[in-house]
Amino acid sequence: MEPIENRVAQGEIEVYNLADLWDDAPITELDISPFLVEGLMLKEKVFRDAVEEHDWSQHDGEHVALHCSTDAIVPTWGYMLIASELEGTARSTTIGRKEELLREYYTAALAEEDWSVYEDKPVVIKGCGDDV
């Protein structure tokens, strides 16, 4: 019996691996409900005090997805205030869950990619088997 050959690897097909775009930084989902009164109501003074007291350095180098686990109505400025605290500490900040963060990250990374190297070449996009 002949050994199995990987003809795709030996051929002229270019393999584009989406996992190569990821920077291996951890993803943190930060629930902002603890910053709210009883987890449900945003009172500006209480919220600003909680944001000021939080140790933002613990998110150094992380990708942070901001979300609220309760049904509270959080005005946009609440998320913006937290995002401004994470500026310069977190690698990226997204309003939403991990899925939204990954979508935004890969959309931005793919938009920056130089696609001209793949022009007139057959390309296989690999990525469905990765955790990210």
Image: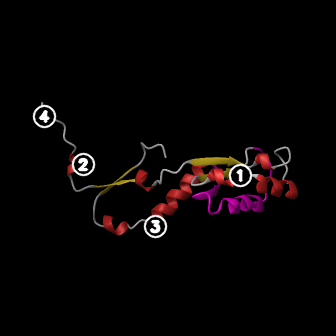
Which comes sooner in the sequence, label 3 or label 2?
2
Question: Considering depth in this image, is 106 or 81 the residue closer to the camera?
Answer: 81
Q: Which residue bears the numbered disc 4?
A: 2
**Protein image colouring:** secondary structure
Residue 125 at x, y percent in the picture: 37, 53
Residue 81 at x, y percent in the picture: 74, 61
Amino acid carrying mark 3 in the image: Glu
Residues tagged 1 and 2 counted as in contact (Cβ below 8 A)? no
| Point 63% across, 49% down: residue | 97
Q: Which residue bears the numbered disc 3?
A: 112
Q: Which label is found at residue 8? A: 2
Which comes sooner in the sequence, label 3 or label 4?
4
How many angstroms separate mark 4 from mark 2 (CA)? Answer: 17 Å
Amino acid carrying mark 1 in the image: Asp
How many angstroms separate mark 3 from mark 4 (CA)? Answer: 43 Å
Closer to the camera: disc 4 or disc 1?
1
Q: Residues within 10 Å of mark 4 (few under 14, many from 20)?
A: few
How many angstroms separate mark 4 from mark 1 (CA)? Answer: 61 Å
Residues tagged 4 and 2 counted as in contact (Cβ below 8 A)? no
Q: Which residue bears the numbered disc 1?
A: 55
Q: On the rendered structure, is 62 left or right of 5? A: right
How many angstroms separate mark 3 from mark 2 (CA)? Answer: 27 Å
- SS for tag 2? helix
| Point 85% across, 50% down: residue | 41
Amino acid carrying mark 2 in the image: Val
- SS for tag 1? loop
* Highlighted magenta segment, given as a residue range: 70-97
